[in-house]
Each structure stands twice: as C-alpha cells, then as structure tokens.
Amino acid sequence: MPRIAIAGFQHETNTFSPLPTHLEHFEQADSWPGLTTGDDILSVFADINIPIGGFMKATKDWDLVPIIWASAEPGAPVSSSAFDTIAEKIVSGIANANSLDGVFLDLHGAMVTEDFEDGEGELLRRIRNVVGKDLPILVSLDFHANITPQLFELASAIVIFREYPHLDMAQTGARAADLLDMLIDRGKPFAKAFRQVPYLIPLSSQATQAAPIRFIYETIPTLINGSVCSADAACGFPPADIRDCGPSVLAYGTDQSATDAVADALLNRFLEIETQFEDNLVSATNAARMASSHKGSAPLVLADVQDNPGAGGSSDTTGLLRALVSAGCTKTAIGVFYDEAVALLATQTGVGTQINASLGGRHGDDRDPPYEAVFLVEAVSNGRFKCTGAMYRDCDVDLGPMTCLRIVDVNSDIRVIVSSKRFQCLDLAIFRHMGIEPTEQSVLGVKSTIHFMDDFHPIAEKIVLVEAKGSHPCRLGSVAYKSLRDDVRIVPA
C-alpha cells in the first residue's frame, strides 16, 4: 500500500492587481473551503471538483497522509509571511511523515510571491531539500500555469487541466494518481521533455471550446502511446510580469527520444495556430448599444473580461455599468460587484429602502470612479449558497452580506448584485440566489472572462466579450512588461 503525502497551495498571481494577498486570504472560505489541515482534508474535499478531490477518489487503497490545503482568490503577489507560513507547514508535514512512497501537490502554477517569481518552484526546492532528489513528487497544475524550468526539473511529473472553463479539475487529480502509480511501479524517473511557447495568449482567447486553442487539446490524446504516458499543455497566465510567463508543453514517458518528439509536436502545433488568433473584444460603448437594441427571447450576455476577480481583477470597476445606464438598457442584471461597504449599508437599511451610495471604483484610479446613484434595495442575504453549474457544482459559497440593488433611473432598468467578498460570476446560482431569474433577463453582465461560459452559454442568445477598464489585461499589446524574456512575442503574430 503506497504511503503518499498530499497537500495543496493555490494562488494565481496577477502582478498588476491592486488587491493584496496575505495569510488571512488563504484562511477564509469563499467559493472553495478555507485553509484546511490534517484529516479534515479527506472529508472536506472528497466531493469537490478540484484536483485533490479527484486524486483521493482515485487512490482508495493508498495510505494518504493529508497535510494542508490552502487557496486564495487571485490577486497581487503573495506576501512573504503568508508564503513562508504555508510552505513551512507543507515542508515540515512531509518531513515528519515517515516512510513516504511519494508526494502529491495540488498547485496552481502561476504563484508569484514578494520574494520569488516562481512560488511553486521555490516550494518544490524546499521540499527537495528534506526528501532528496529521488522521492516521486507528482504535481497537478492549473490550465493557466506559467511553468518555469525550475518547477519542471524538481517535479517528477506534472499534469495540467485540459479544459477552460475548468470542468476537468477532479479528472486531472485522477490522472495525477495514475501517473504517480506508474512512477512508483517503475522505480525510476520518467524520461521527460519541456518546451516554452514563444508568444502570449490572453485569457479571452483561451477557451478550449473554440478555435484555435481547441486544436491543441484535440491533439494531445493522439500523441500518447506506449512509450509516452503523459503529455500536457499550459496556456499561461499573461497578467504576470515575470520571466517565464506564457504557454508551455511537457511530456513524460519511458523513451527519451519519443518523449522529446511529443513535446516538439505540441510546440509545433502552437506555432501552427499562432496566426489564427483574432481580437475578440468589443468596447463597452458598442456592447451597451447592442444591449439596448437586443430584442431576442434569450439573454445577451456581456462579459466584463478585464475586471474578472478570478484573474486578479478588483471586481468593482464601473465602465460597463456606466455604458449600460447611458444606453438606457432595460431588463438588465450585472454581477458580481465587490463592495463590502455598500453591501453592509443595504443589508442594514433593509429590503424596500432606498440608499444613496457610491458603488465600486475603490481599487482603480480617477478614470474609473465609483458609480454614484440612488439604489432601491430589492434583496439581501448572508451570501451563503450552493453552486449548481458543472465547474463548481455543490460547492458551498460564502460571500458575506450580499444585496441586489436596482438603480433608480427613469431611463433604464438595471439591477446590480453586490457582495462582501470577491467572486467570479461563473454560476447561474449567483443571480437566482438574489431573486433574479437569468433566463427572464434581456441582458446579463458578468465579471468573468471564460469560466461563466459553461453555465451561461445554454441560456444565452449571444455572448460578447467586453473591453472595459480593469486590472486583468486582455489586450496584451498595451501591457508594459518589464521582466518577460526577450524572445517572447506579447501579441501572437
């Protein structure tokens, strides 16, 4: 019976984000559980669609040694104290777990700390210092990982999500278990290969249901054969101004030349599709015009892609909201605004009252001020509900006091959902929890980039990706990178 230590440490770091990341952000629960230790991991994550849950289900006969799992909402670099605190718990837990046959780490792959561009690589370095170079360490990474040579070298093998939206997180954990089982049985390291792609791809162009990225993930299964047991690609996380930002591919097998050939084939596939990327963003003004004239029987969904809290956005910019009001949009709902002060004011004054409030705009600059208006409080809640979409199904969400506000304006009919914690608007339950039936709206605004698509696409007449101000840049040509390596094209050719 293999004895395997398991742990998780997740953060997607946006170096342009104004939102700090401290230990308290890992400790608190939001859409995922808060910091969890020891045997609680075995019960808390058993049925959640994340890698550690899938790994545990696939290893029913193994002796698992759960250490710690922690995740924080994407934001600015992780503070040194937060990183050191959680990393030390992982390292000491592994060091004190006697007679291990391996380690599984549920990581993200795009963590930057105040001290290290490669948070995951530094964590692996510290673990290797106590377990040596030979103990198998299997790592699962997010689709948006910025994989560094250090992380690749220190991990025995890496598996990566293959879907965006990330519907296959638990499946990725199960693949990790299969690969670790092979590695233990093999008794020696895999042949492995790693290649970095020489251009960046904005998250708004990374949806795996659409061309050209779809072609990468259709290719991967065809490359796995008898001598190559695993191959994956990461599309990178562009809002990270670090040397190794960007897509990469990797492969593992029993034959080095065959493994190299697969990595080369995947890299060449990326090079082949580079010219196929298109600018798919619409200005907030034009999107609002489309919304005001929308007469379809199903909602027009407008994604505020650059204010996505799931990519480090503040989730409180007001550009799209202003455009919708100016265009006189009706039967319109938008979410989720992160504004604790307004959420608390509304819950305190109560349903049916009117409040004067300055909504959002708390983390931007003078070009994106708060939206000042009179709002009717239509609904309030404690912010606790259960997701129903495939990506987060059955996850218990806790966003603190929440409210649904209707803007008091004779020329428009717009409602806004406001929460006390940041949360990407990726699940229809968010609207239904606040008394809004999404299918009955003419226009839905979501602060998300791609993750909303799986749940919202079936009810939408059309989806539009909107370019409004936000700290998650999707038009990369305007980003002033300082640390990116010289051979990387910021905009695909």
Image: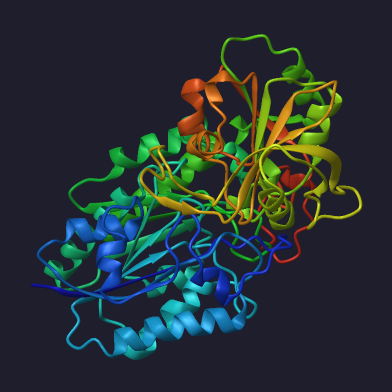
Q: Is residue 259 visible?
A: yes
Q: Residue at x 72, y 46 (%)?
A: 476
Q: Is residue 214 above or below residue 26?
A: above
**Quarter holding residue 239:** bottom right
Q: Is residue 79 above or below residue 149?
A: below
**Quarter holding residue 484:** bottom right
How far across and how far down the image is residue 128, in percent?
36, 84
Frontmost residue, 227 versus 3: 3
Q: Quadrant of the N terminus?
A: bottom left
Q: Residue at x 25, y 80 (%)?
A: 135
How far across and how far down the image is residue 59, in percent?
16, 61
Q: Residue at x 26, y 58 (%)?
A: 46
Q: Is residue 210 visible?
A: no
How far across and how far down the image is residue 251, in percent?
34, 55
Q: Residue at x 55, y 67 (%)?
A: 111
How far across and how far down the image is residue 449, in percent?
60, 40
Q: Quadrant of the C terminus?
A: top right
485 on left or right of 71: right
